[in-house]
């Protein structure tokens, strides 16, 4: 598998800046003085073992959780000092694809996609809403599922619909929480291709949370490895694993040798 | 407090409120019909021997109407709704919490508190009184069938006696009670569901707590309302 080499990234423009952020849950410190930057147009993969705080990081960035200390800037806005209304407006620019897709199970696929649209773009006509929904669904290759319920979809289809639902608001930033978790290898490839397609077609900057190295290699322009609550290794995929560090090497060995 | 702040501020989730009214109201009709009818029938049947001792069976319509309108209809409706609607709302919101659907609403620029909580509280506050009137009607019908199984009484005569026995303040008390009970059931069940702990155990606990806490508070409210209404005469 070739390492990714996407050209259309502006390393002078920081989209997300996580600055000296710490987060604990009770006595458990999950993130400790973490620093991270996401640049315009890049796919940044956050790698780490389960329970190391990867998902907490993107929940902090999107304002679902508040940091104990430090600042988070997204598109120039300081997330942890925004009020509810300002946060809601900022979130329209952030797409969030959840680990279990988080589709509304009482609604059809069409209603799932319409849901954010009708609430945030109230001037759209019914025909425009239908066109938007069909275009985005077609973009993820699942137009045929438009009238199905989430319970009738496979895991891979649910992931794609979840991504489609976030894309419908045309976000500037995408957050993917374990996009390939629980999927077979071929469906993982499909999802990875979709993440790259989204980056190219919608010009998004993305943070991808995963522990799947194949995914990291295929979609990541840079990789940040979370070790003991800190980003100790950040760089290109090959650079990250060019080490004898016993906290990192087994991770690579398991994925590509075992 | 947040409920009262959100309920009067746009956007108003009218479509969701109507959907919830349908879910809470219309889908409860079969259970409510059966329960209301049986309560009216059985209450009349059990009251008859006591009145018979004094030769006062002709007072049955008045007794039934007062009992049903003043106490039984609001309480029976509230208890049935606590079980059916409370558990449904508690489990639904809790499972949405577990599967991150509430977070998904939050990040897609929707106010989940307004969409999920406010709409359900409005729907229960509006629909429980509607169901209560229905239970009163169906309970009185049950009572009538119980009476005519032993005595002869025309429908018109029964209705006349029923309405002669109840005063406008009884209707007001019934509406007041059922509004309070509806708000309580909505508030308690949405609260325990929305703020439930994560995990499948949390779903079960939320459904259970919604029912138990709703019923408990409904009984406390009933006690307080009876005292207040007695003081007001």
Image (cartoon, coloured by chain):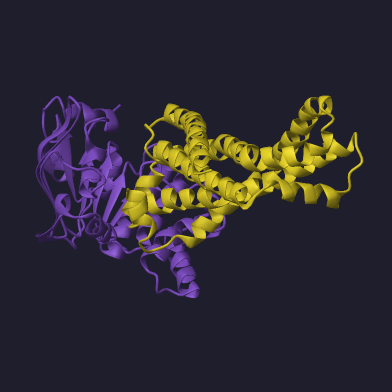
| Any part of residue A122 in sight | yes
Q: Is residue A233 left or right of residue B98?
A: left
Q: Is residue A243 above or below residue A3?
A: above
Q: Is residue B73 left or right of residue B198?
A: right
Residue at the image point whose x is 24% and y is 53% from the top? A206
Residue B144, given in percent of the width and then of the height, sits at 82, 41
> For this rendering, which residue is in front, A55 or A186?
A55
Residue at the image point whose x is 46% and y is 63% from the top? A138
Residue B142, given in percent of the width and then of the height, sits at 78, 40
Quadrant of image for the N terminus of chain A = top left
Q: Is residue B13 above or below residue B73?
A: below
Q: Quadrant of residue A65?
A: top left
Which chain does the purple colour mark? A
> For this rendering, which residue is in front, B104 or A251?
B104
> For this rendering, which residue is in front, A202 or B39?
B39
- Chain B pictured colour: yellow
Quadrant of image for the C terminus of chain A = top left
Q: Quadrant of residue A210?
A: top left
Residue B121, given in percent of the width and then of the height, sits at 46, 48
Residue B190, given in percent of the width and then of the height, sits at 44, 42
> For this rendering, which residue is in front, A88 or A205?
A88
Residue at the image point whose x is 19% and y is 51% from the top? A221
How many labels sit on residues?
Answer: 0
| Any part of residue B105 in sight | no
């Amino acid at each position: 598998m070739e390492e990714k080499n996407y050209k259309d990234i502006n390393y002078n423009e920081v989209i997300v800046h996580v600055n000296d952020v710490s987060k604990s849950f009770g006595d458990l410190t999950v993130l400790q003085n973490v620093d991270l930057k996401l640049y315009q147009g890049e796919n940044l993969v956050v790698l780490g073992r389960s329970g190391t705080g990867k998902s907490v990081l993107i929940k902090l960035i999107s304002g679902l959780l508040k940091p104990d200390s430090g600042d988070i800037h997204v598109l120039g806005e300081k997330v942890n000092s925004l009020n509810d209304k300002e946060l809601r407006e900022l979130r329209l620019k952030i797409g969030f694809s959840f680990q279990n897709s988080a589709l509304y199970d009482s609604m059809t696929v069409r209603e799932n996609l319409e849901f954010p649209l009708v609430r945030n773009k109230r001037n759209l006509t019914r025909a425009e809403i239908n066109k938007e929904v069909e275009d985005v669904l077609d973009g993820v290759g699942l137009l045929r599922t438009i009238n199905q319920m989430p319970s009738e979809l496979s895991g891979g289809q649910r992931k794609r619909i979840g991504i489609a639902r976030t894309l419908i608001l045309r976000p500037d930033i995408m957050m993917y929480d374990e996009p390939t978790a629980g999927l077979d290898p071929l469906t993982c490839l499909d999802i990875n291709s979709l993440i790259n397609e989204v980056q190219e077609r919608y010009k998004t900057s993305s943070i991808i949370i995963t522990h799947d190295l194949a995914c990291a290699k295929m979609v990541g322009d840079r990789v940040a490895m979370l070790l003991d609550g800190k980003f100790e290794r950040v760089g290109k995929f090959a650079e990250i694993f060019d080490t004898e560090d016993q906290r990192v090497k087994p991770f690579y060995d398991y994925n590509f040798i075992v | 407090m947040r409920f009262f702040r959100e309920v009067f501020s746009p956007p108003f989730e009218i479509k969701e409120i109507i959907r919830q009214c349908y879910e809470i109201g219309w889908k409860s009709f079969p259970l409510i019909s059966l329960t209301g009818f049986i309560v009216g029938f059985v209450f009349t049947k059990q009251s008859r021997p006591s009145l018979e001792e004094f030769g006062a069976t002709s007072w049955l319509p008045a007794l039934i109407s007062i009992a049903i309108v003043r106490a039984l209809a609001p309480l029976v409706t509230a208890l049935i709704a606590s079980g059916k609607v409370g558990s449904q709302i508690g489990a639904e919101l809790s499972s949405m919490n577990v599967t991150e659907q509430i977070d998904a609403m939050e990040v897609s620029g929707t106010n989940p508190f307004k969409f999920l909580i406010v709409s359900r509280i409005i729907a229960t506050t509006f629909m429980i009184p509607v169901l209560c009137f229905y239970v009163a009607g169906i309970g009185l019908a049950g009572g009538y069938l119980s009476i005519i199984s032993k005595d002869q009484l025309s429908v018109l005569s029964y209705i006349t006696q029923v309405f002669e026995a109840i005063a406008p303040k009884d209707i007001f008390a019934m509406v007041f009670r059922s509004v309070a009970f509806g708000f309580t059931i909505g508030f308690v069940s949405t609260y325990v569901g929305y703020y439930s702990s994560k995990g499948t155990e949390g779903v079960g606990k939320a459904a259970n707590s919604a029912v138990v806490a709703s019923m408990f508070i409904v009984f406390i409210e009933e006690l307080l309302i009876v005292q207040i209404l007695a003081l007001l005469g």
